[in-house]
Amino acid sequence: MKTKKSSASPRQPAKLWQLRLYVMDTTPKSETAFANLKKFCESHLKGRYRITVIDLLKRPHLAKGDQILAIPTVVRKLPKPVRTILGNLSDTERVLVGLDLRPAG
Amino acid sequence: MKNNGHKSTSPVTLLPKCPTGIQGLDEITGGGLPRGRPTLMCGGPGCGKTLFAAEFLVRGAVQFGEPGVFMAFEETEAELKANVASLGFDLAGLVRRKKIAIDYVRIERSEVQESGEYDLEGLFVRLNHAIDSIGARRVVLDTLEALFASLPNEAILRAELRRLFRWLKDKGVTAVITAERGREQLTRHGLEEYVSDCVILLDHRVNEQIATRHLRVVKYRGALHGTNEFPFLIGAEGISVLPITSLGLNHKISAERIATGIPRLDAMLGGRGFFRGSSILLTGTPGTGKTIVAANFAQAAARRGERTLFFSFEESPNQIIRNVHSIGLRLEPLVKGGLLRFHAARPSLYGLEMHLATMFKEIIAFQPDVVIIDPITSLMDAGTASECRAMVTRLVDYLKAGQVTTLFTSLTQAGHSLQQSEASMSSLMDSWLLLQDFEGNGERNRVLYVLKARGMAHSNQIREFLISDRGIDLVDAYIGPSGVLTGAARVAQTAREKAEALASQQEAARRQRELKRKRVALEQQISGLRSEHEASAEELRQIDEQVGTQTRLLTTERTELGRLRQADVSLPMGIGSARGNSKPKSKR
């Protein structure tokens, strides 16, 4: 499990984003997903996110809790409601929609 | 057995089978589902897919020591537990004892976004984890197709499903995958494309307002299987598939005979009643006393100590007991004693298959020697003709296999030809009694025939069937030149004959008396004549005597006279000579 923390941004209210990235083993696919997620967070949520990477190969029992089927999967635990994005996050547009970062309209 | 699809003898097959434990299914499939392979179970909503799958797991865990994983895509763990509890399965307990693992998979499409490539490794991980955690040998995926609704990318999903089925095979688990039935395909999303070893189709049809579930093994690679549709039902103890063809004609046969409770009927049946373990059909128009004959048989059987099960589809048990009480049958003590049991149900209460299953259950629970079904025709309304015939066949086979003597009563509508309407059923029966009304002379009388009695000499004669407060009696019907006479006509005929006999008797007596009198008269006449005859003889004698006396007197007088006249001594001579001799003598 890898954890990355970032200091709170002075511009936005201190709202911590808790993200979980589910992967299987350290495959290129999961590496890509992690890189994409990190890049995305750095540009949109700088300083107020935390990514937890869960390797299901080592902790298979954790898959049930977050209803994981697809690998890789990102789960936004906080802020509520829970959001899920499947895939290696190569489509940034969709990640924005998925994480509900895109303002309505 | 008509519709033959299933070979009762399963050939040598290399394909190992995994018994489901579901009543009847293993018979159809020749031992169970293909072991270590996935089986697709498809059907429309409400046809029992989930319950089938659940029973497969539960029976595996309980009966065959094979733990199982239930991966639910539609129902939560709590819902599932509650649902199968209705079949008497303690899923929660099995989960606690690590015999069954339940994993509820849920993906809300509205909460999910796709971005880039992914695979369903998470599903594999979960499944693998669940399997390994309890050492599962069986897996159920119910209903995998829910994924098509929650995962937007069908291409990925299809690729992954193909991989999943491969993976399940490699894992060596026997899997059941349920799927919704599609319009043109077996399944809505074409899952049959991936699962090619065994496909079972479930169906729920409503026929004349009665719903029946059917099961068909569409495909079973590498094994012989029944290809017919088999009705199945979901009862309180799980699912039972009812294979018609799995029963053969190889029952054990008994030569023992059992009395019918009506001595004259026994006499008609070769003097000793029915064969044990035979099936008897008793047909009759309304009000001919079918139930009474049945009750009589029941009483006789129970009094012999045989366990008797009475299925009543028209009257309540109490009503039957009360009614037959009036003809001197006492069923209540037998019921209390536990030898006689009634089971009453309205025919329209549920479908034919449910009735059959209920009856099987009762029979298994009670272990009867004698079963009475009164009337079987009521059940006929609960299904189509072919279904009914199949049902009766199964029932007869089942009971015969258990050496249970069965009496079916059958109501024939007035106006129908008796023989015709029952023909389809009668061929299944060993004995067939016919009760009929005879109408005439302003009255109805019951008569009884033995139409058939396999394997015994039986009377071909009609008997009048009398029901009185002392029970049933069979009397010879009068058969005369004017046909068969029954009831009052028979009594009248008998009386007429009696009167005629009496009249001729009286006539003879009268003639006898007359002759006697004549004879007496003649005798009197004879004796009168005789006395007359005697009287005249006497007279004659008297006359003779008189004459003699007179002669003597005359002689004496003449002698006296001669002496007086001093005549010759030729006295002893007659008067004439004496008189004639006197003068010529003197002349000489």
Image (spheres, rainbow, N blue to C red):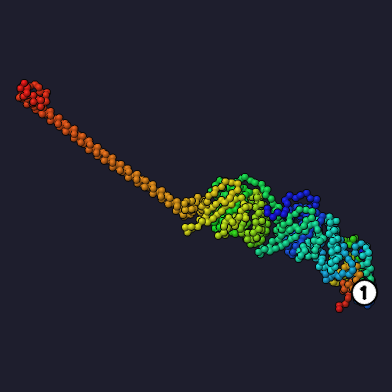
Residue located 6% across and 26% down the image: B561
- Residue A37 falls in which quadrant of the image? bottom right
* Horizontal side of residue A97 vs B203, given as left or right: right
**Label 1 packing within 10 angstroms: few (<14), some (14-19), many (20+):** few
**Is residue A73 shown above or below B329?**
below
Q: Chain of mark 1?
A: A
Q: Count the labels in the image.
A: 1
* Disc 1 residue type (three-letter): His
Q: Residue B147: percent from the left, percent from the top?
A: 82, 65
Residue located 78% across and 56% down the image: B220
Q: Residue B522: percent from the left, percent from the top?
A: 28, 41
Q: Residue A68: percent from the left, percent from the top?
A: 86, 65
**Is residue B49 shown above or below B30?**
below
Residue located 92% across and 77% down the image: A12
- Residue B580 falls in which quadrant of the image? top left
Residue B319 in view: no
Q: Residue B533: percent from the left, percent from the top?
A: 22, 36
Residue B121 in view: yes
B413 or B257: nearer the eye?
A: B413
Q: Which residue is mark 1?
A: A44
Residue situated furthest bottom in the rendering? A105
B568 or B339: nearer the eye?
A: B568
- Residue A83 falls in which quadrant of the image? bottom right
* Horizontal side of residue B583 vs B264, given as left or right: left
Q: Quadrant of the C terminus of chain B?
A: top left
Q: Secondary structure at mark 1?
A: helix
